[in-house]
Image: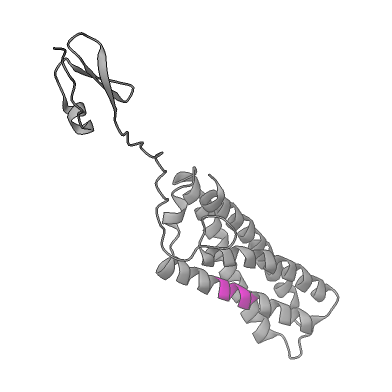
Amino acid sequence: MPHQPTRDSPSRCRSATNSHRVRQRGVCLRWSRSGTPSRRIRIRRVQSSTAQPAPPASVPGLDGFLGSRASLGTDLVFVALFAVLPLLAWSVQLARRQHYRWHKQAQLAIAAALLVAIVIFEIDMRFVSGWKPRAVDSPWWPGGVWTALSVHLVFAISTVVLWIWVVWEAVRRFPVPPAPAAHSRRHRLMGRLAAADLVLTSLTGWIFYWFAFVAS
């Protein structure tokens, strides 16, 4: 009497070790003693899903609005540097046209904007977001990023010092309403230095921003 195969469960088929059971292309074949396959039992194959890339590591703080890796505070300072330069150029033109009162107002507005930007930036960097976790994905990290930051800080710190000095001396030494005085020549020289320093601060700040938060 020929050997009658019995139906095996997939688990038994997978665990079978005798010569009468083989597995081919996801099909379990149980062979009769005559050497011909007597029955097929399909095995349910669990298809593995395509491996998904791991989500990016979360970084502290609030994300910015310019589409880079920078935080909200950094993006605000970045935009503020763009806004300050046209105001600076307009202020210089006002002084040349002898609109001293408007020149004074523009300079005070620039000083206030710089102060607000510095406060926002420091709060964001020290207590909210930080910048290092957001910069580590840059191909320029760490050497290029730190070099760009160091150059930027040289001009940023000197700009703050010069701007405070220029504004303080102008408020103390010029009459009210403002008009040419003995301090005018010194004010003109120091004002040009402060303006050039501010431009360099903006340029180096944008370079640092690209190195740290844009480059990939």
Q: Is residue 63 visible?
A: yes
Looking at the image, residue 176 sits to the left or right of residue 44; the answer is right
Is 167 part of what is drawn in magenta?
Answer: no
Residue 170: which quarter of the image?
bottom right
Q: Residue at x 47, y 50 (%)?
A: 146
* Up-down relation of residue 36 to residue 209 (above or below): above
Give x and y (percent) for residue 162: 60, 70
Q: Is residue 186 left or right of residue 19?
A: right
Examine the image and state in which quarter residue 37 appears. top left
Q: Residue at x 84, y 79 (%)?
A: 98
Q: Which portion, as a residue range, is magenta?
A: 111-117
Is residue 183 shown to the viewer in this render?
no
| 6 left or right of 149 in image | left
Q: Residue 75 in the image: state x and y as whole percent.
A: 57, 63
Residue located at (21% from left, 32% from top): 9
Magenta includes 112?
yes
